[in-house]
Image (tube, rainbow, N blue to C red):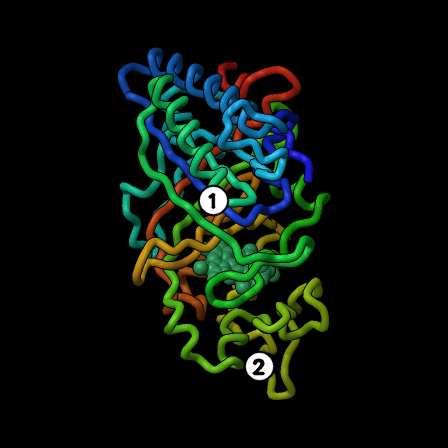
Amino acid sequence: EAAIPFRGARQAGVTAPQQPATHLLSFDLPRTSAAADRKVLRGVLAALSGTLATAAADSPSDPRLQGGGTTRLASLVGVGPALAARLDLDVPASLAELPPFPGDRLDPRRSNGDVLVQLSAADRWTLTVVAELVGTAAHTAGAVPRWSQSGFLPHTPPGTTPRNLFGSKDGTANPDHTAAEQWVWGPPGAHGDGTVLVYRRIHMDVEGFAALSEGRRDRVIGRRASDGVALTGTTERDEPDIYAKNPDGSYVIPATAHVRLASPRFDRGARMLRRSYSYDDGPGDRGLLFCAFMRDAAQFVRVQNRLADRDALNPFLQHRASAVAYVLPGAGSAGTLGERLWA
Ligand code: HEM
C-alpha cells in the first residue's frame, strides 16, 4: 500500500482510512507572554510539520520507519480553545471549551492542552517511533508534554465498521462526503479546510454490559450487535427509524436507546464524523477514546446533553478525560501547518 501523503489542503488524519492504531499527544506552551508564546507556537508548528512530513514519506530517513510505505502514518495537529483565545489566533469564532456534563469524572492531567497531535498508523511500532520524534521536535521548539494516550481497533477488513469493547460496530452512521462538507468541515472561507476534534476518554464497564441479555444490549444501543443493523432496519446502512412504533404504541428503538438520543433528527440534521478507538490501560481501565470531528463543538454539546440526561448506556460509562482542538487546515503543497493562524 502507498504512503498517506502528509501534504494537502486538509490534514490526512481526519479522513484517511481509519488505521488500526492511534496515539494522541498533548502539549502546553510555557505561558510567559502572549507575544513570546506566539513565537513558540510558530516554531512548534514548523517543527511538527517537518517531522510529520518526513515520517509520512515513502522512504523516511529513520531506519526504524523503513516500511516502504507500509506504516500508513496519518496525522493531524490542532490548537486548544484556551490557547487560541490567549494568543488571539484566527480560529472559528465558535471555538470554545466544553461545558461540564452531569456524570463527568474528568482528570485534568489527562485533559485539554494547548497543542494536540493525533497519529494513526498500521501498527503500534510506527506510533511509538513517531511519537518520540514528535515529542523531541515539540520539546526542542519549547512545548511541554501534558498527556498522551494510545488506542487501537480490532482487525477489520477494509470497508467494514470496527467494533468497540461492548462488541458493537461503532461508526456506522457517519456523514457521507456531502454531509461532511456541511457539518464537519468549515465554515466555508478562511476556515473551510479546518475542523474541530472533540476527544473524550470514556471508561466502559465491559463486564457489566456483557452481563445483560443480548436482546437487552441491543435495545440499549438501538442496533443489533451481531450485524450492526438498527432495530428498525434490514441492512447496516439503513438509518434508524426513530418514529417506528410497536403494535402496543411503544417505540421499536426504545426512548432511552443510544442511537435515538444521538439521532441527528433531534438536531436539524447535524452530524459528526466519529472515528473512535478502544483503549486498555491496565486492570479495570478500559474503554473508548471517543474522537469526533465537527464544524462546531456545540454539535457535541447538544448530543452529550441529551445522552447525559438519560442514555441507557450511562450506567456502563464514565467520561474520564476530555479535550477540544481546532484541527488546522493542511500544510498545502509547500507550507507549514498553521500559516493562517496569525491573520
Ligand atoms: C452511534 C456506541 C459515546 C454520539 C453509536 C452506535 C454505537 C455507539 C454502537 C451505533 C453505531 C454507529 O452509528 O456508529 C457508543 C459508545 C459510547 C458512545 C460505546 C461510549 C463509550 C457517544 C458520545 C456521543 C455519541 C459521547 C456524542 C456526544 C453518537 C452518534 C451516533 C452514535 C451521533 C450516530 C447516531 C445516528 O446517526 O444514528 N454510538 N457511543 N456516542 N453515537 Fe455513540
| Residue under pointer 2 | 250
Residue situated in front as seen by the camera: 98 or 273:
273
Question: Disc 1 designates what residue?
Answer: 124
Q: Which of 324 and 287 is in front in this view?
A: 287
In the shown orientation, is residue 334 left or right of residue 302? right
Residue 159 visible in the snapshot: yes
Is residue 309 toward the left or the right of residue 291 in the image? left
Residue sitting nearer the eye, 150 or 77: 150
Residue 57 x, y percent position in the rendering? 60, 27
Give the percent coordinates (x, y) of residue 55. 53, 28
State whether residue 257 is above or below residue 155.
Answer: below
Amino acid tagged 1: Arg
Q: How far apart are marks 2 and 1 (CA)?
A: 46 Å
Left or right of 196? Residue 88 is: left
Considering the numbered disc 2 on the image, is that residue within a helix, a strand or a loop?
Answer: loop
Amino acid at dot 2: Ser
